[in-house]
Amino acid sequence: MSFELDIGATFTTQGTDPFDLDAEFEVETGETLVVLGPSGSGKTLLLETIAGYHDHSGRVFFDGRDVTDDPPEERDFGFVFQDYALFPHLTVRENVAFGARYHPDALDAESVLADLGVAHLADRWPRTLSGGEAQRVALARSLAIRPEALLLDEPLSALDVPTREVLRDDLQDLIADVTSIYVTHNRTTARALADRIAVMRDGRIVQLGTVEEVFRRPATPFVAWFTGSNCLPATALSDEVVPQPSATHVAIRPEFVELDGAATNASLSATVGRVTPRDGDNRVTLSLGDEVLTAFSSRSLSPGETVAVSLPSDHRWAIEDGRPE
Amino acid sequence: MSFELDIGATFTTQGTDPFDLDAEFEVETGETLVVLGPSGSGKTLLLETIAGYHDHSGRVFFDGRDVTDDPPEERDFGFVFQDYALFPHLTVRENVAFGARYHPDALDAESVLADLGVAHLADRWPRTLSGGEAQRVALARSLAIRPEALLLDEPLSALDVPTREVLRDDLQDLIADVTSIYVTHNRTTARALADRIAVMRDGRIVQLGTVEEVFRRPATPFVAWFTGSNCLPATALSDEVVPQPSATHVAIRPEFVELDGAATNASLSATVGRVTPRDGDNRVTLSLGDEVLTAFSSRSLSPGETVAVSLPSDHRWAIEDGRPE
Amino acid sequence: NDGWFGVAAATFGVVLLLALGMPLVMFITRQNPSLIVEAARSSEVHTMLYLTIYGPLLATVASLVFGVPLAYLLARGFSGQAIVESLVDLPLVVPHSVAGILILFGFGRRGLFPGVSVLTTITGMVLALTFVSAPFAVNTTREAFETIDSRLEYAARSHGATPFETFRRIQIPLAYRGILTGGVLAWARGVSEFGAVAVVAYSVNFFYPFTGEETVAQHAPVYIFNTFTSAGLADASAVAFILLVMSAGIFLIVR
Amino acid sequence: NDGWFGVAAATFGVVLLLALGMPLVMFITRQNPSLIVEAARSSEVHTMLYLTIYGPLLATVASLVFGVPLAYLLARGFSGQAIVESLVDLPLVVPHSVAGILILFGFGRRGLFPGVSVLTTITGMVLALTFVSAPFAVNTTREAFETIDSRLEYAARSHGATPFETFRRIQIPLAYRGILTGGVLAWARGVSEFGAVAVVAYSVNFFYPFTGEETVAQHAPVYIFNTFTSAGLADASAVAFILLVMSAGIFLIVR
């Protein structure tokens, strides 16, 4: 059963401007919807508002029903916190069994732990767990109550890079069939886990679509920037490079920028800025007048060198004026 | 003037095992030495011990001179903290000018701020700065006293990914000519900023070398794992794939693993596990018996598919037994 | 390892520590053991000690029963909180003998409950002690609640626990030490109190279970003051010594 | 928004707030204005109020001068810290009249400084008040030092500041509000104190600058108790009212 969320909420804290949260979306059964946005965009607040943790003015609707005044224990969501928030005075088993008292249909703690491959941790105390172990236990605790959906708040962000990569792979399998909303500022995590991505900015969803759509066809220059695409103002480009006259910006992912490529497409002349190695090739920044363009290239380039750049037409994407910026 | 550090220190906290720090290395003038290691490896402690913040048993030598008992104010290092640690009761200008009273040759606050492009922030309060702005001010504060070297403790880790990328590029320019020791757990940051990398584990440096050496010729399986290389035990491979009989492990970076490549090198058969998109191609995990291998490939692959894998001989690296693990 | 500044700071600190510690050392070394033994055998002293433990204990129970829920609400925050905070801190700034006078106005013959007699009764003593010790119970408990990560509360709620269940299974166990400390501080404050009790119940009528009848005694600080003015420093200090040993003993047991 | 549990908690909390607040309300509404005016005009009351402000102020200065360095050292930590902490908290658990007796033993005729007279002197009063109020100054200041991120201290040191310069330019400015609060709490504790002062200096001889000569007065809590026992509740409450208004006024000015 898929569900719809419609959130319009205003948060007022003394001494700061009120923060408006405004989002409407549907989550399909079994889908992982990733909310991607910078810090301060309100993505954690969105998740916590869905869970019902905060007082706010405005209303929250779940499948058209007003749930604004429902307390968290009556909303059927599991929540996995950034720092896991395991109960420190309870063992791992007691943590996972915590919700069973309130959910007659809850799964057995032992069996959930076994499913997640951490049955051996059952008698341990939370403070003795590694980050990866704590993450699995937190996931087990939430899955045990068989929630409508899982809400995950950057559960990978506290981990070292290699550990994060391993756990991201695991998480992909573990939540593959669970309806989930996953919040992150990391586009690599978003791309790995998402069925669909909602890009958030200043409390609003600026684009919602498949991974392909968001990464290849950004709706605004902000989405392009935040997903790692290049985004050049149309005025900085010659007319033949701009896909359509109404475009204000042209977006292209760095992997499609061709350096010294065949002149089948409009060629531009650029100066090499910084060359930084990455896995497999180099990340190259290019100065194009006042604009900066990023490309990936395995060619050997030196800073200051002039190169011909082409933006293949089937990878250019026109951003039009009038869309929300 | 380059300098040598020789650190042998034991830290004792009640209720925990004593932690030993043991490192000896030289830093060249103008060089950026990156200390790369997981959390808990002691890399921040190393930096803080160089700066003289902690009591410990053992000795610290600087160019052969015992500086163990020198207080921090007599050690000539600038320190840039993870969360910047700007003085909250002083303006940006006052922060940058803080050290001038104790350093007659200090640079003028205004001019350092101008050099870093943040002269317009001089009258602001630290709490009003964005992460990127605070980072520059913290850098300015440390550069103003013209230290022997800069010590940087993951100053990028608190930032969003796109902001981090921009600031990493900037930082590359800003500290290019400054002798610095930079601590991080992020191999991408390490690769972008380092002249040389010291990989740290459990308080010891397990490998120290150029970026190329550490990433392509890891000294131990741990270094291979932490720098993102594949590392397979020699016993899991046929003899012709193992570069030399004494090797216990074979390391190869994922970008050099060829899928269905020409059979010029020994071919192995593997099952495709997970296919995750990344910029430009896919990250593919492959099961090779009990071992897992990561490759980058732009081919369209499905999980479960069997593929031929080759590990080109000029990219394989033999890890030998007897090296510290 | 702070150089001359550390030495200077330590010197200043030691002066204060000597001012606090030396009187205790002098007090202990100058005792007359026979006077202490005599006092320890006196049934008057026994009754007094019973009252001194029992009265503050009742006040502590009252402070915790009504103070822990208030501390919980204060830790969560509510509108008008500043007024409630001022009210809770009020007894800290009211001079001790004035506190006694306030209790007489609030609960005396012309007070809220004219039928209840407070002057020279255990009721009056407990009301006075609750008034002066409640801030310790509330503030310490509140700090304990505030140090609990609010995400633990969120987690409990999302796993189905009602606010009461969350309070019972998460907040109380995690704030347990703080509540205990608050109780001990409130009790110690009650045992110490002189002014408010001296005004409301210089002598206290209460039921003494060891003899099974109503009796009259004084709260220890009052008794010691009374002994000091009527019999002199030596006799007062013998009783003070017994009280100090008893307080120290109970403190060690609780910790 | 906690449902029945929130209502229950609020109910319990309100009972405590009423117990703390109603006596004050009853006290204020039941005053006899003519008695207050009479008391406010009395030069005896003026001398008493001067002593009540001045004595605790001296004790607060002493507590801060010697207590802030100690608080700084406690915040940094040192070996043997637990013993020092117990000594600092000692006055909190010593009954008030016993504190007075300790001061007599420590600084009286047979004490550390036999040449110094404490009984019925301002010296004795200030020593007694310092003893009971120092823990407030030390503990509050210590908490303020402890909330400062130690990396700010590291940063100052690495930029060339010695421990003293770091203390002066970083720790003091950042802990300023905490030190002020500690001072106000210590002062309020001193104004409140009855037991220790009643034992050491029931009547105090001191130099009164407005008449330019030595005079005798009582610390306000003692004066109020004395008035209560000799002249009754009505007269005592008039003086208590003036003292409360004065305390509240000074509190508001300081905040």
Image (tube, coloured by chain):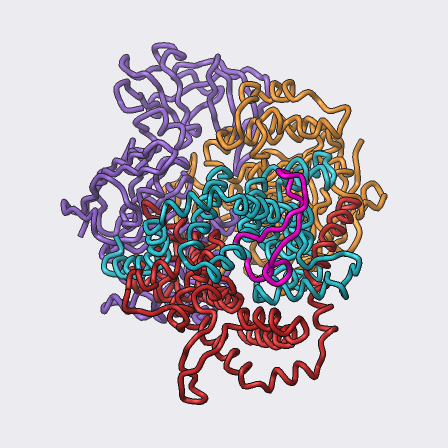
Chain colours: A purple, B orange, C red, D cyan
* Residues rendered magenta in the picture: D194-220
Tell me: B32 left or right of A255. Answer: right
Q: Nearer the viewer, residue D106 or A92?
A: D106
Q: Do we see residue B229 in this rendering?
A: no
How many dots with numbers? 0
- Quadrant assignment, res C57: bottom left
Give x and y (percent) for residue A68. Answer: 21, 46
Q: Residue furthest right?
A: B65
Q: Is residue D197 magenta?
A: yes
Tell me: B160 left or right of D5. Answer: right
Q: Is residue B324 magenta?
A: no
Give x and y (percent) for residue B226. Answer: 57, 49
Give x and y (percent) for residue C40. Answer: 61, 83
- Quadrant assignment, res A304: top right
- Note whether C148 is above or below C64 in the view shown: above
- Note whether A188 is above or below B104 in the view shown: below
Q: Nearer the viewer, residue B200 or A303?
A: B200
Residue at image coords 50%, 72%: C219
Q: Residue furthest left?
A: A64
Give x and y (percent) for residue A293. Answer: 46, 22
Q: Nearer the viewer, residue C156 or B22?
A: C156
- Note whether C251 is above or below C142 in the view shown: below
Quadrant of the snapshot with the C terminus of chain A: top left
Residue at image coords 44%, 74%: C204
Q: Residue furthest bottom?
A: C211
Tell me: C67 left or right of A299. Answer: left
Residue at image coords 33%, 42%: A45
Q: Do we see residue B263 in this rendering?
A: yes
